[in-house]
Image (spheres, coloured by chain):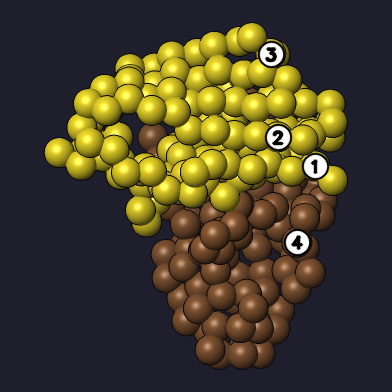
Amino acid sequence: EDQVTQSPEALRLQEGESSSLNCSYTVSGLRGLFWYRQDPGKGPEFLFTLYSAGEEKEKERLKATLTKKESFLHITAPKPEDSATYLCASADSNYQLIWGAGTKLIIKP
Amino acid sequence: NAGVTQTPKFRVLKTGQSMTLLCAQDMNHEYMYWYRQDPGMGLRLIHYSVGEGTTAKGEVPDGYNVSRLKKQNFLLGLESAAPSQTSVYFCASSYAGTTEAFFGQGTRLTVV
């Protein structure tokens, strides 16, 4: 069964403390791996799409990487405004998105 | 540029009542989706549409119906609401199946 698992469920960091979020997937015929950010009471907001193992993308303090089994969202020197829930999703061979439950990131000043 | 707009934002229903959630997008996207989001779970696809006049079932379609009579609108109906349908509902649209999706602000539905 196709599945996406995110870890940890929650992560508390001090401002400036770098870390990584994990997204493990077991999807046959991967058509893309997506990262979204969701703020409380709002809809998810697109961050990145990765299509093949070895691909990397960056945006400000965020960097997403992809292997054949997992993706990482690296956050470097985070600020309090980076606090949010980060969601990953994989597109299967039918182009249907399978979503992880998310990682709630809290950055303390 | 409004993007994706959902109405209403909040609703409380009694068990057995019916309602329709409206989603409108102004980006000329072909693909539209309805998801539900429950605590501790990922977004789950209810129904989706790949173009005007077409709809298809997602992962959790039971108890819901949809219509896409116009390209810009995607309606989600609950014929007889049940407490298990208490959730936050999100509509999204995208240009294609593997391109970024744009989400609405969500509808918080409570069925009592």
Task: Find the distance from the CA under tag 3 to the CA under tag 2.
Answer: 12 Å
Is the C-beta separation of discs 2 and 1 under 8 Å? Answer: yes
Residue A96 placement (x, y as % from top left): 76, 39
User: Callout 3: helix, strand or loop?
Assistant: loop
Looking at the rendered structure, the kind of residue marked 1 is Asp
Which residue is under mark 2?
A25
Please determine whether, in this image, residue B108 is positioned above or below residue B81: above
> Which circle marks residue A2 in the picture?
1
Task: Find the distance from the CA under tag 1 to the CA under tag 4.
Answer: 15 Å
- Which chain contains the residue that carries disc 4? B
Q: Are dots 3 and 2 on a single chain?
A: yes
Residue A73 placement (x, y as % from top left): 48, 26
Looking at the rendered structure, the kind of residue marked 2 is Tyr
* Chain that is yellow in the image: A
- Mark 3 Cα shell of 10 Å, populated few (<14), some (14-19), many (≥20): few
Which residue is under mark 4?
B60
Please determine whether, in this image, residue B95 is positioned above or below residue A84: above
Q: Are dots 1 and 3 on a single chain?
A: yes
Q: Are dots 1 and 4 on a single chain?
A: no
Is the C-beta separation of discs 1 and 3 under 8 Å? Answer: no
Residue beneath the point at 37% across and 56% down = A41
Q: Are dots 3 and 4 on a single chain?
A: no
**Count of labels in the image:** 4
Please determine whether, in this image, residue B42 is positioned above or below residue A65: below
Which residue is under mark 3?
A53
- Which chain contains the residue that carries disc 3? A
User: Callout 2: helix, strand or loop?
Assistant: strand
Task: Find the distance from the CA under tag 4 to the CA under tag 2.
Answer: 20 Å
Q: Quadrant of residue B72?
A: top right
User: Callout 4: helix, strand or loop?
Assistant: loop
